Amino acid sequence: MKALLLAAGLGTRLRPLTERVPKCLVPVGGRPLLQIWLERLADAGCGPFLINAHYLAEQVEAFVSRSAWPERITLTHESVLLGTAGTVRANLDFFDGEDGLLVHADNYCLADIDAFIRAHRSRPADCLMTMMTFRTETPSSCGIVTLDTRGVVTAFDEKPAEPKDNLANGAIYLLSAAFLDWLRSDAGDVTDFSTEVLPRLLGRIYTYETSELLIDIGTPQSYARANALHGE
């Protein structure tokens, strides 16, 4: 299973930590987030990997060159950020017509990747992708999903002021080959996954809810929580 890891973000909410270190390389439990992701994905039999870089890209390049998987990783440098969906669109050939993973590499995630892949393979036939979900303690800062009885997304509310539930989008997706064809042929010039892609596919997104730890490392508070919970 090939995997595209989004690692180009500026991490502005984590400053001053990210003034000298890209967000994807901030350490949790002494290991960079990107290393944690690559280890867990490799252990699940995933690869090869494509990683996009932009902010402090030279540090990401140096990390890849001394990692355990340099021959399995391709780096793509974005001189101008393409957006989450724009990066997928620009690298459709990487997936070579096969299903693949899309990961926001600035999440700290201990989910069972094997179980996620199994869920995707048993999804309803009309679903083009599978979204990882989790229960959040801060629903107003997340994309909240509503599901039907099959576990398919029927509504998506990005950072609601008055959330009605706490089942959140984990920003980790398994994309079918049919989805990639749709993105190539019918999606137009979309750039953002949450605001432009997901709303157009309501009723066609299956979900897998993880009970394991999943934290968006977006603020100093969430970063501190990830480090406090690491290893538990």
Image (cartoon, rainbow, N blue to C red):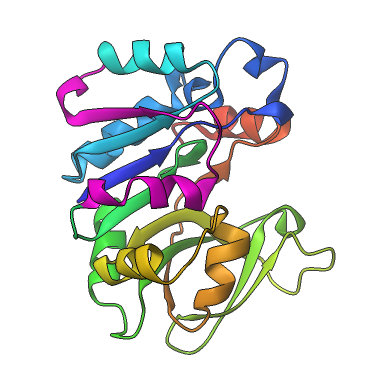
Left or right: where does residue 31 sit relative to residue 50?
A: right
Picture layout, residue 15 above or below residue 176: above
Q: How many marks?
A: 0
Residue drawn where x is 32% and y is 52% of the image: 101
Is residue 112 among the parts visible in the rendering? no
Q: Residue at x 35, y 74 (%)?
A: 128
Return the x and y of residue 51 as percentages of the image width and height: 36, 33
Work out whether residue 201 or residue 153 is closer to the camera in this orientation and state it.
201
Q: Based on the displayed image, in which of its 4 quarters is residue 71 positioned?
A: top left
Q: Is residue 109 visible?
A: yes
Tell me what residue is drawn at x 47 percent, y 30 percent. Answer: 78
Residue at 31% in and 84% down: 124
Q: Position of residue 70 (x, y in %)?
A: 20, 20
Percent x, y of residue 227:
56, 27
Q: Which residues are magenta?
A: 67-95
Residue with the most extreme bottom position: 149
Quarter of image, res 198: bottom right
* Magenta segment includes 73: yes
* In the depicted structure, whether residue 54 falls above or below residue 208: above
Query: Where residue 171 sits: x, y (%)?
Result: 51, 53
| Magenta stretch contains residue 71 | yes
Residue 90 versus residue 232 in the image, above or below:
below
**Outermost residue to the right:** 161
Image quadrant where residue 180 sits: bottom left
Q: Is residue 16 left or right of residue 155?
A: right
